[in-house]
Image (tube, rainbow, N blue to C red):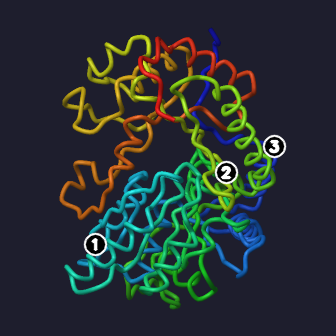
Amino acid sequence: MRKERILLCLAHMSGKEQDFIKEAFDQNWVVPLGPNVNGFEKDLENFVNEQSLVTKQVVALSAGTAAVHLALIACGVGAGDEVIVQSFTFCASSHPITYLGATPVFVDSEEESWNMDPELLEVAIKDRIAKTGKKPKAIIPVALYGMPYQVDRIMEITNRYEIPVIEDAAEGLGSRYNGRVLGTFGKYGVLSFNGNKMITTSGGGALICSNAEDKNKVLWYATQARESYPYYQHEAIGYNYRMSNICAGIGRGQMTVINDHIAHHKHVQALYEELLKDVPGVTMHGNPWPESDSNFWLCTATLDPNLRIKGQENAYKQIVTGAVGGAAGVIHAASKATTDCQPNDNVEALRVCLDKANIEARPLWKPMHKQPVYKNAPAYVNGVSEGLFKVGICLPSGPYVTDDDVRYIVDTIKAAIHLLSVSPVL
C-alpha cells in the first residue's frame, strides 16, 4: 500500500511565491493592499482578457465567497429580493444571497454539463415574475467542477429579460467556452484561490468586473466603504474583503504556472478516461460539446446503481465521528448516519475503499434545494442534480497526482468492484 495520501486536489507551490512574499516583508507591505495585490490583479486581467471581446478588470479579495457577496451588492440586491442560482453547487454560491436578506431561487441542471438548465431557468424567471410581480435581481450560473455551462443560451435568456449575470467560476479558472475564459461573459465573474483550487493564495478570491466604474464600486465596498476625508467617514456599510499583500504574492507566483496546472489537470482527466473506459459501471464525465473546454478542476465519475462494491452492505451503518475526506473545519457532529438525500450505498462503499487505500475521494456536491437550511426556498427541479448526487464521485486530481497515482487509483477501484449485477443501459 502506498504510504503517502493521494489528495483530491491541491495546488502546487513553487519557489516564485517565496520571492514575492520576501519582497513584501522587505518592503513592509504586510497589509491588505500593496504592490503584490496590484500586480496579481494585473496578471489576472492579462489572463482572463486573452481572446476576450471586451477588456475586464479584476479586484483581488479575501475569498471567492466575498466576491459573490460584493457582486450581489453591486447588482443592487437587498432585503426582499430574489436571486436565481444553480442548485448543484457549493454553498458559497447561495449563502451570500441570504447575507443580504434576499431569497435564493434554485434552478436544477441539465444532463450534459451538469450545470444550470437554460430551459428551466426561463421557466423560473417567468414564474417568479408572475408570483412576485418583479424580476429576480441577478442570476448565478456555476462552472461545476470546472465544466462550462451553456453560456450562449443562458446569456441570450438573461439579456432578453435584462437580468445581470454573476458567473460563479470559482471552480472554473481557465475553463473556456468557445475559446473565451469563463467569468468574462456576465456582468461579474467570481474566482477562488482556496488551497484546493487551480491556483492558490492559501485563501482568497477575485471578482472580474466589466469596467473601471464597476471595479471602483467593488473596491469601495471591499475597503469598508470609506469616504475621502482625513478621518474615517462612512456613508454606507462596507466590508474588510481586500486580499492581503502576502497572499497576493503567493498568487503572483502561482500565475507563472497556471497554464501548466490546467494542462496537467486535463492530462489526468484523459488518463482516467483511458484507464476506466473498459470498466463496466464506471463512467467519467467529460466535455459534452465542442464549445466546452473544462479545466477539469476535479475529475468526476458516475457509478451504475447496479454496481456492487466490496463492503457495500456496511455503508452508512455508523455516524461519522471525524472530518470526511479531508473536509477540514467539520466540527459539528451529525445526529444520525443517514439523510433523505444521499449518495447510493455503492458510492459510499467505494469512498471507504479508496480511503482505506490512502486515496481521498468525495461525493458530488449535495444540491442546495435538498439542504435543510434551504427547505423553504423556491426551487425549480427536474431530478438531474439529485440523480447525479446519488451516483457521482470525485477522484483525485491536480499537480501532485502523478500518472502512477492515477493507475493506482484505477487499480483500487477495479479491486473494489464486486460485480455488476445487471449490464448498464447504453
Helix, strand or loop at mark 3 = helix
Residue 208, above or below 92 = below
The quarter of the image holding the N terminus is top right
Q: Earlier in the sequence, mark 1 or mark 3?
A: 3
* In front: label 1 or label 3: 1
Q: Is residue 388 left or right of residue 256?
A: left
What residue is shown with label 2? 295
Kindly identify which numbered label has been placed on residue 254. Answer: none
What residue is shown with label 3? 15
Helix, strand or loop at mark 1 = loop
* In front: label 1 or label 2: 2
Q: Position of residue 317 (x, y in %)?
A: 26, 17
How far apart marks 1 and 3 lie (CA) works out to: 44 Å
Say which residue appears at 69% left-offset and 21% top-offset: 407
Q: Is residue 391 left or right of residue 103?
A: right
Q: Is residue 319 left or right of residue 268?
A: left
Say which residue appears at 39% left-offset and 11% top-offset: 311
Crowd rating for badge 3 (residues with CA inside 10 Å; few <14, some 14–19, many 20+): few
How far apart marks 3 and 2 lie (CA) works out to: 24 Å
Crowd rating for badge 2 (residues with CA inside 10 Å; few <14, some 14–19, many 20+): many
How far apart marks 1 and 2 lie (CA) works out to: 32 Å
Q: Earlier in the sequence, mark 1 or mark 2?
A: 1
Q: Position of residue 60 (x, y in %)?
A: 61, 67
Q: As shown in the figure, which amino acid type bears the numbered disc 3?
A: Gly
Q: Position of residue 423 (x, y in %)?
A: 47, 23
Crowd rating for badge 1 (residues with CA inside 10 Å; few <14, some 14–19, many 20+): some
Q: Quadrant of residue 216?
A: bottom right
Q: As shown in the figure, which amino acid type bears the numbered disc 2?
A: Asn
What residue is shown with label 1? 102
